[in-house]
Image (tube, rainbow, N blue to C red):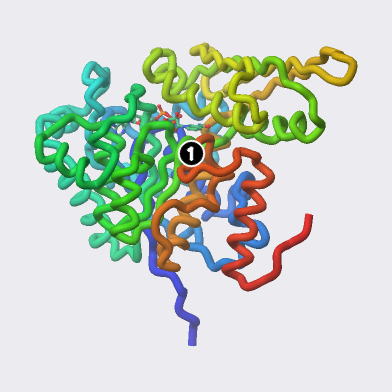
Amino acid sequence: LTRASPHRPHGLWLIGARGSISTCVAYGLAGLNEGLLEPLGMCTERPPFERLGLVPLDQFVLGGHDVCLRDLSSSAVELVHHGILGSELIAAGAGFAAAYEARIRPGILDEPEVGLADLDPRSRSLGSLAPREQIEALRSDILSFKSEHDLERVVVVNLASTEAYRAESKAWSSLAELDGALERGEGLPASVLYAYAAISGGCPYVNFTPSRGAGIAALRELALARGVPHCGNDGKTGETLVKTVLAPLFTARALRVLSWQGYNMLGNRDGAVLADASHRETKVRNKNEALRELLGDPAVHTHVGIDYVPSLQDWKTAWDFIHFEGFLGAKMSLQFTWTGSDSALAAPLVLDLARLAAFAAKKGEAGEMLHTAAFFKAPIGGGTHDFHSQFRALVAYAEQHLGTPRTRN
Ligand SMILES: NC(=O)c1ccc[n+]([C@@H]2O[C@H](COP(=O)([O-])OP(=O)(O)OC[C@H]3O[C@@H](n4cnc5c(N)ncnc54)[C@H](O)[C@@H]3O)[C@@H](O)[C@H]2O)c1
């Protein structure tokens, strides 16, 4: 007798399905399942998480929404040229990627982006529907995917381009207000409509982007009412990860940080989007907030500049300059340079988060997944930005589920 697998296949539905991160998720999964890659960058493959009985990686079926005409193979070719994906992986993942491409559905466009080049005309026509009907179309795509592939559940991850900054709105303050705005046909960020569709469809939701998504009060309320776990916002993959490791050092040693200047150069599509001031605003807010909290000084002089430098492609380079003061008024400085492939850093975190979200849903947990704060620049539900404290909370969560005592460190 063979032992039945405790898991039926799970869906992983990616919004921004043909973007760089999504493409790395697809080829990365194929490579892991073919034994061509090591699970580097994934904490769920290591102790204690690997004992939680998370969804096996070969049990994920991919689908998603995008608004562009570019197909997945063109995104993959770009990443080959950028030196991120190898040709052996492209050959091995071709079948898996083609099946995924066939499951990508036209998404809805955020209103300020109507001039987007390369726009799928089907997405343009979805944009003429009332917001309620747009939510209905998105939810129906996700739920059809679930039933067609007989999936136990579908985790939805937002990996779409960062939206233009929107100030808080009264319409987002409660579910009743949001439903009222939807009835009146008021314009809402696309990320909010996607998150509404996922959560109302009972799907765990992860917002890897700095866009609003399920972070607004109205959708946090919906998630609790619907019994759905969710987390976000804005994956902590590079410069901010290093910052949230380093900043507690200055606080613990009682050194006074005078200025913390950051400068990012990136050359991928994400960088092109962030070249626009209203999109950059969404991103920079998260980067500054973490630092101010960690240094305990809301007035510290800090600034992050972001420039689009096309020749760097996916290899984001960040330079940070920290000017600080010690005993006797001695002024000193620390500088670091980080060069990383943004998409290769992000993709394993997406797989970790998809598994953790599926696990939380299986355990009947609802609302914000506070234990996932280590993954985000602006964790929903707040808490410290200190990476090591956040990671300890994640380990404690796993140990609580395993019934083992906390590890000492
Ligand atoms: N790579 C990282 O380290 C990192 C870290 C934190 C956050 N992020 C965020 O993750 C997101 C994805 O990054 P990427 O490098 O893959 O970007 P990308 O530009 O390569 O991909 C984004 C994809 O989203 C699609 N898209 C745009 N608007 C859409 C909409 N309304 N609905 C559905 N699809 C839409 C685009 O067509 C594109 O295919 C960005 O918001 C980025 O800021 C990335």
Q: Residue 65: image x %, image y %?
A: 29, 40
Q: Residue 139: image x %, image y %?
A: 21, 49
Vertical placement of residue 399 versus 109, above or below: below
Q: Residue 45: image x %, image y %?
A: 61, 56
Asked whether residue 99 is in view, the answer is: no
Q: Residue 377: image x %, image y %?
A: 53, 35
- The image quadrant where one finds ligand 1 is top left
Q: Nearer the viewer, residue 199 or 326?
A: 326
Q: Is residue 154 left or right of residue 323?
A: left
Please tell me whether mark 1 sits on a helix, a strand or a loop.
helix
Q: Is mark 1 within 8 Å of ligand 1?
A: yes
What residue lies at 24% left-to-right and 60% top-to-bottom? 148
Residue 209 occupies which quadrant of the picture? top left
Which residue, given by chain and number where applicable, does mark 1 sit on?
24
What residue lies at 66% left-to-right and 52% top-to-bottom? 392
Asked whether residue 318 is in view, the answer is: yes
Furthest-bottom residue in this view: 1
